[in-house]
Image (cartoon, helix red, strand yellow):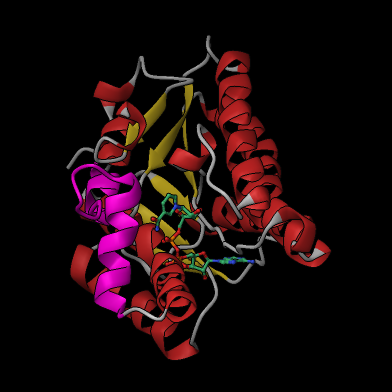
Amino acid sequence: MALTGKNAIVTGSTSGIGEAVARTLAAQGCNIMLNGMGEKSVIDGLIAEFPKKYGIKTVYSGADMSKPAEVKQMVADCNAQLGSVDILVNNAGIQFTAPVEEFPDEKWDAIIAINLSASFHAIKTAIPLMRKQGFGRIVNIASVHGLVASTNKAAYVAAKHGIVGLTKVVALENAQSNITMNAICPGWVHTPLVQKQIEDKAKEQGISVEESTAKLLGEKQPNKRFIKPENIGAMIAFLCDENGNSMTGEIITMDGGWLAQ
Ligand code: NAD
């Protein structure tokens, strides 16, 4: 298994893409620090399931990604509890939609904090540890919205464009060390974050959830299929093993043709 003995933090791994990424890395032998919000029973279930199913060490950080001190503590805790931070996947994210003139200030602040600044704080704390050990792999989950815009997503699109820029800068700063940093830009992935948008649109337009789903895919994603979260996990596993050595500063789209249009 390519990642045996490596230690990874996956932020926002109690649901959706993050959980699938954590499972893919764990299946490759990587020890995991889980992180994220949600029901205690779900989180406890994951903490119990991972070591049994994948035969790896699993720890959990309840760090709130909107709080810089907690983000930094999460990285320090992984280093202390697992012994190193070899892989950092910045995935936690939230969404809120409204036209810019109606966009609540607190929603803007929360999205910028969780979807952008948390990655900065985690990266800033992890890089010195990775330099010392001479190895590091950082993957940021951006979005197609890191490269193009859609209406009503001012904060999300701004944060995701920011993370794309941050990815390139840190990749350059570490190009001569054995630390790589890349971003993945998925199109629609069927997770609770997207399900809420589908249901909101169905209500708004007086259509069924099925019609709303078809409309969402039809509008932007030419293959008209959701991207599988485990495919994103597989791409991250590739970036983290030997074959990913020369890939850094890459902005990798997985979008069913969204950006080809
Ligand atoms: P999700 O809602 O299923 O999962 C989000 C995760 O982030 C959860 O584990 C949640 O607990 C965690 N989280 C939220 N706020 C947090 C906080 N303050 N502190 C710690 N953890 C927090 O959503 P998802 O679709 O899996 O999204 C994951 C990432 O993928 C996000 O960055 C999102 O922007 C990005 N993304 C999603 C899609 C998509 O179509 N679903 C497309 C492109 C990019």
Give above or below for 40 relative to 153.
Answer: below
Which residue occupies the foreground of this view, 93 or 12?
93
Which residue occupies the foreground of this view, 202 or 159?
202
Q: Residue at x 36, y 66 (%)?
A: 191
Give above or below for 83 relative to 251.
Answer: below
Q: Is residue 231 left or right of residue 174?
A: left
Q: Is residue 127 left or right of residue 227?
A: right
Give above or below for 18 relative to 135.
Answer: below
Q: Residue at x 43, y 22 (%)?
A: 250
The span picked out in magenta is 208-234
**Residue 230 visible within the image:** yes
Point out the residue furthest to the right here. 105
User: Could you tell me residue 166's position as x and y percent?
Assistant: 63, 29
Q: Residue at x 37, y 19 (%)?
A: 247
Q: Which corner quadrant of the image does residue 229 belong to?
A: bottom left
Q: Which corner quadrant of the image does residue 185 belong to?
A: top left
User: Could you tell me residue 140's position as x and y percent?
Assistant: 49, 40
Does the magenta run of residues contain 23? no
